[in-house]
Image (cartoon, rainbow, N blue to C red):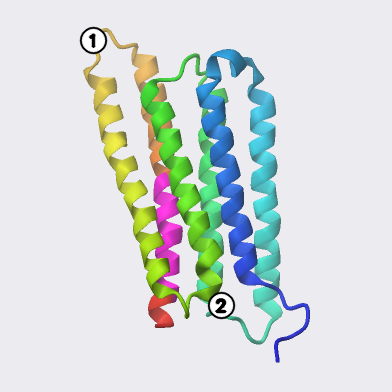
Amino acid sequence: MAKKNAFDYFEAFEQLSELGVQEAEVLVQFMEDYETCAGELKPLIDRVHALENQGDEINHHIFEKTAVEFITPIEREDILELAHQLDTVLDDIEDVVFRFYMFNVSAIPEKAVEFAKIIKDAAVALNQLMSKLSGFKKNPKELHELLIKVNDFEEMGDRLYMSAIRGLFTAENADPVDVLRWTEIYKRMERCCDACEHAADAVSTVLLKNS
C-alpha cells in the first residue's frame, strides 16, 4: 500500500523542467523584443531569478526527502543526479540572461534569437520527457523517442554554435569587443543545450538500471 502523502519525486522533476521551459520562453521573448525592451533588463533578470529560486526550493525538498525516506521509487543517487541536472538547466539559462546586463548588449544577432529558440525547444522536449518519467516501466519506447528528441536539439545547438562563432571571426570590420562579447554569450547558450542533454542522459541511466 502506498504511503499516504508520500513525496512525489516525479512530479518534482516535472516542476523543475517546467520552470526551465518558462525561463527559456522569457529568454526568447526578450531577445525577439530587444529593441523595444533593452532598457528593461532589471525586470527580466528578476523574473528569471525568481524562477531559478523556485527550482532551488524544489531541489531542497528533493534532497530533504531522499535523506530521510527509507524507500524511494528509483535509486537515491539517480534522484539526486537528475535533480542536479535539471537545476543546472535553470542555472545555465539564468546565466545567459545575466550576460546581457554584464556585457551591456546593445543589439541581438539573428543567430542568437535562433539559438534561444533551440534552447526553448530542448527545454520543452525535456519537460515532455519528465512528464512521462513516472511511467518509465510501462512506456520505455515513448521515453526513448523523447530522449532522442532532446539529443537532436542539442546537436542543432552544436551546429549553430559553430556557425555563429565562425561568423563572428570571419565578419569584415568586426568590432573586437563585440566578437568577445558574443563568443562568450554563444558559449553560455550552447551550455544550455548541453544541460538539457545531460538531464536526458540521467534519465537514460534510470532506464538502463530498471530495464
Q: Give how far across and how far down residue 111 sits, in percent.
A: 36, 26
What residue is shown at x 37% (from left), y 55% (from top)? Answer: 149
Assign the C terminus to one quadrant of the image: bottom left
Quadrant position of residue 197: bottom left
Residue at the extreme top = 173
What residue is shown at x 37% (from left), y 67% (from top)? Answer: 144
What residue is shown at x 41% (from left), y 46% (from top)? Answer: 193
Task: Check the image and report above or below for 70 versus 20.
Answer: below
Position of 94 compared to 196: left or right? right
Q: Which mark is residue 197?
A: none
Which residues lie in the magenta part?
193-206
Which kind of residue does numbered mark 1 sit on? Glu
Between 174 and 28, the one nearer to me in the picture: 28
Q: Secondary structure at mark 1?
A: loop
Task: Tell me which label, 2 or 1, sits earlier in the chain.
Answer: 2
SS assignment for the magenta stretch, majority = helix
Q: Let me know if residue 184 appears in the view.
A: no
Residue topped by disc 1 = 172
Position of 73 compared to 122: left or right? right
Residue topped by disc 2 = 76
Q: Is residue 1 magenta?
A: no
What residue is shown at x 41% (from left), y 58% (from top)? Answer: 198
Q: Residues within 10 Å of mark 1 (few under 14, many from 20)?
A: few
User: In whole angstroms, how far apart are the C-alphas of marks 2 and 1?
Assistant: 53 Å
Q: Let me know if residue 140 appears in the view.
A: yes
Q: Residues within 10 Å of mark 2 (few under 14, many from 20)?
A: some
Q: Give how far across and how far down residue 69 sits, in percent.
A: 69, 82
Task: Check the image and report above or below for 67 versus 54.
Answer: below
Task: Check the image and report above or below for 35 versus 49.
Answer: above
Q: Count all numbered tags in the image, as a single digit.
A: 2
Which kind of residue does numbered mark 2 sit on? Arg
